[in-house]
Image: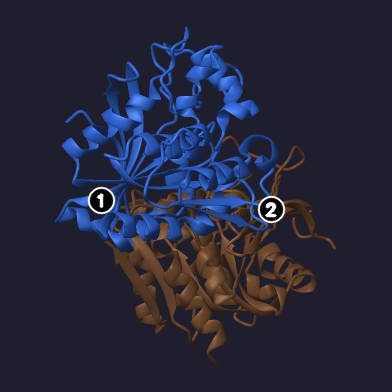
Chain colours: A brown, B blue
Amino acid sequence: MKLQQVSAVKMFDGMQYVYQHESESVNGKMNVAVYMPPQAESTAVPALLWLSGLTCTEQNFITKAGAQRAAADLGMAIIAPDTSPRGEGVANDEAYDLGQGAGFYLNATQEPWANHFQMYDYVVNELPELIEAELAVDGRWGISGHSMGGHGALTVYLKNQQRFSSCSAFSPIVAPAQVPWGQKAFGTYLGDDESTWQQYDATALVLAGQTSDSEILIDQGKADDFLADQLKTELFADACFRAGQKVNIRMQAGYDHSYYFISSFIDEHMAFHYQNLTVS
Amino acid sequence: MKLQQVSAVKMFDGMQYVYQHESESVNGKMNVAVYMPPQAESTAVPALLWLSGLTCTEQNFITKAGAQRAAADLGMAIIAPDTSPRGEGVANDEAYDLGQGAGFYLNATQEPWANHFQMYDYVVNELPELIEAELAVDGRWGISGHSMGGHGALTVYLKNQQRFSSCSAFSPIVAPAQVPWGQKAFGTYLGDDESTWQQYDATALVLAGQTSDSEILIDQGKADDFLADQLKTELFADACFRAGQKVNIRMQAGYDHSYYFISSFIDEHMAFHYQNLTVS
């Protein structure tokens, strides 16, 4: 076992684990939270990969979103990794939106980041393969996430449909190359050549024809303080319309950017993924 | 309005508020979290008073328990106060189980605690009356809580059935006068005369005939690290048997003392209270 158990707590008749493991991709230790539903005791189950947002660890989603109830009902595993490698040897920045806790699900090419900040490879390949090798999951994967993690879910999904067959997002950064959070991160991790940014920009990917046949589900709060400047959901809506990408963008009146918003709609996302993954 | 709004976030089509207000009982400011379900926009609703455990603030329950979904479904408000007054002028102790965050839902008689640590009066009278005066609740109250808050729920309920008509608890300290947490707190807040402790001990109250006609619901994890030394559920079970108090104590295999346990069964507690409060 590469997965070393950090904690194990019973929840909804299943188990909420936190594991730590050595990651080749990020050249260091990674923490990952795993919820295994009760059905996994007797059979392998489909899994949802959840990518968290800025400043989050593997703890936020499993503590605040309330997704385990639906996971136990449906029989789905939830895999929620930390948002970056951490520790003394890992490059960092004092800002909340750069460095540790802000990996942006890309492969950094610039120093001092390139050595550890390879979160794209980690979430696309290494982590799913490790989970499939060591836990009772059956290889059917959905992907979702929040904010920076919504950006991760959309971009990873669009480019890796051989692995992920269902995608949703909460409050995603849909066009990072066009907004301050993304421009700062991409400029730092990828350098000034903006042509290298497009591979990690969901709006650019869709406009370049990197689409899927399956409908993507997005929930976005209309009272989200980051909507106008950082999220710009309309850019992705327009790109999907032009590219023929099916997307169900639900602009939710009154909801903000918090986990209170996520918890309000996570059951519907769990059902969406379960439906996509199990009904062929 | 005495309730000053600290935050307001939409959740499950209702609103999760945090308020602060001046409390006469505790002679200082108190924080209280209030979830108002969508039904409260058009009609007054029944309410659950939730009492949290050691070290908790008004935040823990509303962030981690996932109770708002059921509250929105049923049409119940949730009132979750902080576990003590706080701040520079309030007596404190370095230990996690004494002073700020450890009010034990009693009226302290000893110095330096008596001035602010009057949490019994606060949760029994001042807080419910304030909530009824200023928010759309209809005067039907249930009470529940966790650990120290489970102790609070049981003792407050047994002595105040004119206000609270339904009681449940998670992992309650059922016999504080007989366990280290309670002995430390009662000795400090109430003094060495152990006869004064009995009024705040659920097991002693039931044995003294302070019972109710309604069944009490208790969930207790069998893998709870505090069960053997601090919770001692069997003492309350025995007292209820002897006193003829109806109680449904569910010893849940594999579950621990955490909010993961609470979240696994909170829906059933919400339904229990709703049933008790609305079916006459």
Question: Is the residue A153 above or below the residue B131 in the image?
Answer: below
Q: Is residue B93 above or below residue B37?
A: above
Locate residue B208 relative to residue B140 in the image: left or right.
right
- Residue B151, given in percent of the width and then of the height, sits at 49, 36
- Quarter of the picture holding the C terminus of chain B: bottom left
Q: Residue at x 34, y 73 (%)?
A: A238
Q: Amino acid at mark 2?
A: Phe
Residue found at the very far right of the displayed protein: A1
- Name the one closer to the observer, A34 or B191: B191
Which quadrant holds the N terminus of chain B? top left
Residue A203 visible (yes or no): no
Q: Residues within 10 Å of mark 2 (few under 14, many from 20)?
A: many
Residue A94 visible: yes
Task: Please name the amino acid that badge 1 sits on.
Answer: Pro
Residue tagged 2: A117
Q: Nearer the viewer, residue B1 or B227?
A: B227
Q: Position of residue B89 (x, y in %)?
A: 42, 11
For the residues beneath circles 1 and 2, the answer to whether they share a chain is: no
Q: Nearer the viewer, mark 1 or mark 2?
A: 1
* Chain under disc 1: B
Q: Which mark is residue B46?
A: 1
Q: Position of residue A216 (x, y in %)?
A: 44, 76
